[in-house]
Image (spheres, coloured by chain):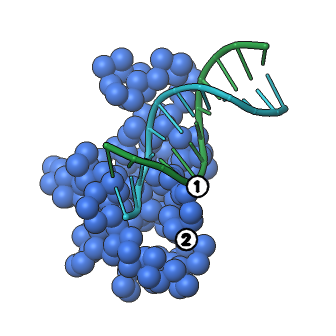
Chain colours: A blue, B green, C cyan
Amino acid sequence: MAYWLMKSEPDCFSIDDLASRPKQTEAWDGVRNYQVRNMFRDRFDVGDQAFFYHSSCAEPGVVGVVDIVSKAYPDPTQFDPASDHYDPKSTPENPRWLLVDVRYRRKLDKPVTLAMLKANAAQLAGLAVLAPGSRLSVTPVSKTHWDAILAM
DNA sequence: GCCAACGTTGGC
DNA sequence: GCCAACGTTGGC
């Protein structure tokens, strides 16, 4: 099994939004980046875990843990002209964008902020989300880094 | 709101 | 296939 970090803007969809869903699951839709699409397709699997990361907010950082509960499958919002994520170049016969379903696992007692991650940069060397200019909304996390962040 | 970094698009 | 223009991300 693999570990991941998935960013979401809390104003748009927060860890509390996920926890308050009836089944505490959510389709992680709207990803329109080929690198992330390929990770969903080739490397994500049921049983993987991911950090839920709040971005573009007062205190960016890891706020919780989610389970990956589906294989990658076509993102329905790409076919919906009313959706912000509509992609007219994608067809159901040949879908361009994928998503995975996530399920709430737990909130951290205290968020591990980006500032805390940076303060532990030596321990977290190579963590993708700390790489300069890293903007991917989904990035891999090694088991070593996963455990280190949970211990913070 | 600014701006740096980076991905995507499209003309050639 | 190059590269300039443009759009988006996301920390600050």
- Determine which quarter of the picture holds residue A149: bottom left
Establish if B2 lies above or below A133. above
Point out residue A13 in the picture as x, y percentages from the top left corner.
25, 49
Point out residue A107 in the picture as x, y percentages from the top left corner.
24, 70
Could you tell me which residue is drawn at 55 percent across and 84 percent down?
A122
Establish if A99 lies above or below A77. below
Which chain is mark 2 on?
A: A
**How many badges with numbers are in the image?**
2
Residue at the spot of label 2: A127
Residue at the spot of label 1: A43
**Is A97 or A120 nearer to us in this picture?**
A120
Q: Earlier in the sequence, mark 2 or mark 1?
A: 1
Which chain is mark 1 on?
A: A
Q: Is residue C4 left or right of residue A131?
A: right
Could you tell me which residue is drawn at 34 percent across and 28 percent down?
A84
Residue A65 seen in the current view: no
Could you tell me which residue is drawn at 33 percent across and 54 percent down?
A56
Q: Amino acid at mark 2?
A: Leu
Point out residue B6 in the picture as x, y percentages from the top left corner.
60, 48
Q: Which mark is residue A97?
A: none
**Is A16 or A91 nearer to us in this picture?**
A16
